[in-house]
Image: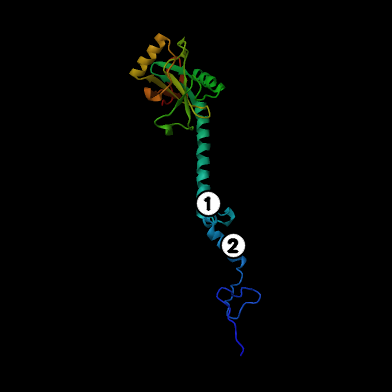
Amino acid sequence: MKTFKRNPIGNQNNDPLNPPATAQKQPAAASINQLAHNMYQSNSHYSNPNNLHSLHKKKSPKRDQAQRDQAQRDQAQRDHAQRAQAQRAQYFNGARCRHTFYSKQQILDTVNEACYKQPTQDDKKATVYKPKHPEKYLGHYPFYLYPLGKELFRTKSGPHYGRDRIVLNSACQLEGVLTEWPKPFELVKKTSNVITGRPWVLYNQKNYWHSDCEIFWGLWNSEDHSSADTKI
């Protein structure tokens, strides 16, 4: 009698070229598009649409137009500020701080002195100024205060000036004239340092009051301190 031998468990035919009749069919190889899809899905970097190349992103026409409009408005504001600054410099004719009058030439000489070397935060004479209402100025921050008037006296800590200052913008253009005076505790400290010859303390704007001076435009005679036009 002819007997048939059964394959023991675990001794299956795994030959892919000659699979047994009962073997399950292997799935066909995945397409290239499917492989790429799986790669993008498995990688968190590529699955994030913000990380895709800019050419693959869809740009909103409305957003692009809004950005262009905003850029045009910003440029128009800068052009207007430059024209207004040039016009102000043309018709600026002097200033009065309390009972002290400064002619146009005096102020322009101070501006030229300050701008001969661009003022910085490390400048001993120029100090950084943060106005409470920067919108009243045409220029942009940082603003600087520079002493207006002659040197009063000199100590070991350096020269000392009066209370009047010119205001310069980041482009070293004249923005205005103001008076700066120390608050009581700062005045006591300054006086003590002058008497004892101690080094000058670091400038702190919070320890000072500021008041805008009158600006004269148009025809103004500095001799009789009269103005034919407007004051600010």
Question: In the orientation shown, which residue stands out farthest toward the left?
Answer: 184
Give coordinates of residue 91: x percent, y percent.
Answer: 50, 26
Give coordinates of residue 139: x percent, y percent.
Answer: 49, 32
* Relative to 168, 29 lies left or right: right
**Which quadrant does the N terminus fall into?**
bottom right
Residue 60 in sight in this render:
no
SS class, disc 1? helix
Task: Say which residue label 1 marks.
Answer: 64
**Quadrant hosting residue 12:** bottom right
* Relative to 175, 24 lies left or right: right
Tally of numbered tags: 2
SS class, disc 2? helix
**Quadrant hosting residue 207:** top left
**Which quadrant does the C terminus fall into?**
top left
**The one of 154 and 211 positioned closer to us in this rendering:** 154
Identified by mark 1, the residue type is Asp
Residue 7 in sight in this render:
yes
> Where residue 36 is drawn, which disc sits there?
2
Residue that appears at 34% across and 18% down: 185
Give coordinates of residue 42: x percent, y percent.
Answer: 53, 59
Q: Residues within 10 Å of mark 1 (few under 14, many from 20)?
A: few
Q: Does residue 110 sit above or below 45 in this rendering?
A: above
Q: Does residue 167 sit above or below 162 in this rendering?
A: below
Give coordinates of residue 219: x percent, y percent.
Answer: 47, 22
Whole-angstrom CA distance, mark 2 to mark 1, is 31 Å
The earlier-in-sequence mark between 2 and 1 is 2
Identified by mark 2, the residue type is Ala
**Quadrant hosting residue 189:** top left
